Image (cartoon, rainbow, N blue to C red):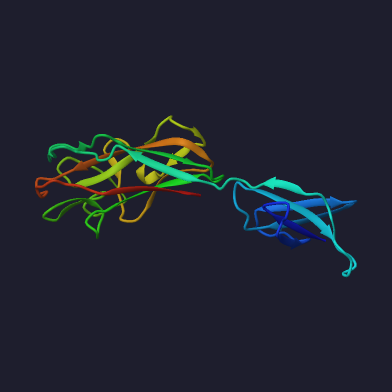
Amino acid sequence: AYFEYGLTASYGSYAPNSSGEYVLNSIFSHSVGSQAYYRTISGLTASTTYHYRVCLKAPPSASAVCGDDVTFNTAAAATVSCSTAGSPIAFGTLSSASIATATPNATTTMSCTFSAGCTLSVKDGGDGSNPGITTTPTYIIGSANASFGDTATLAAGTEGYGIQAATTSAGSGGVVLVYTRYKQTGDAVGGFELTNQGLASSSVAITNREIAVTHKVAISGLTGPGAYQDVITYSCVGN
């Protein structure tokens, strides 16, 4: 026994009946008389209607006898998307006497149809060698502190720079959890890296869930003068 399948009732492809399974994405099953036949097939296009039928041929010299035409639809491909609003942000004039908070927040809206959810990541440009906020002539306020630690508690008069992340009530679907590094409050911040760091993640599909990021910076009396800036990149992937 074997299956014929394709995009029309003319088929065009075939697969032998199999007693084993593969890690593939559609299962053909059909009965002829009291006998059931099946085969798992890979490489099918998402969101597409396929035709198939089971055929019998025995002995080898005999003509094939085929069952009725049957159709099925493949599932839609999983998708993920994210967009960030609130760019550019600004700290205004910095003072060593206080900790500055940028406005507005950077809010990312994320959706995905992956059954295992999706992850939002963040990275910054720094000075190309280390993460932080920079000015020209070259001076960097390290993230999260002068030692480029993962986290830091900012204090007026001591250099440091980083973010706090929190979810909002917007959207639907599963819960989005902020990674411990960035789940900070008060004057505590999570530091950036030059490579992607997980910011928040879901374990199931979500629709228009929001993650709001607050940026904070502190300078010292020795911090170099200038207009400081940073290039921050948000990206998302399916889990």
Give 226 or 49, whichever is nearer the viewer.
Answer: 49
* Residue 104 left/right relative to 168: left
Q: In the image, what residue occupies the spot 45% across and 35% down?
A: 208
Q: Residue furthest front?
A: 10
* Residue 238 left/right relative to 227: right
Mark yes or no: residue 184 visible: no
- The quarter holding residue 58 reads bottom right
Residue 136 in the image: x percent, y percent?
12, 53
230 w.r.t. 24: above or below: above
Q: Residue furthest bottom?
A: 61
Residue 128 in the image: x percent, y percent?
24, 59
- The quarter holding residue 153 reads top left
Residue 218 in the image: x percent, y percent?
19, 42
Q: In the image, what residue occupies the spot 23% across and 46% down?
A: 161
Give 38 or 196, whichever is nearer the viewer.
Answer: 38
Q: In the image, what residue occupies the spot 30% across and 56% down?
A: 194
Q: In the image, what residue occupies the spot 13% across and 46% down?
A: 227
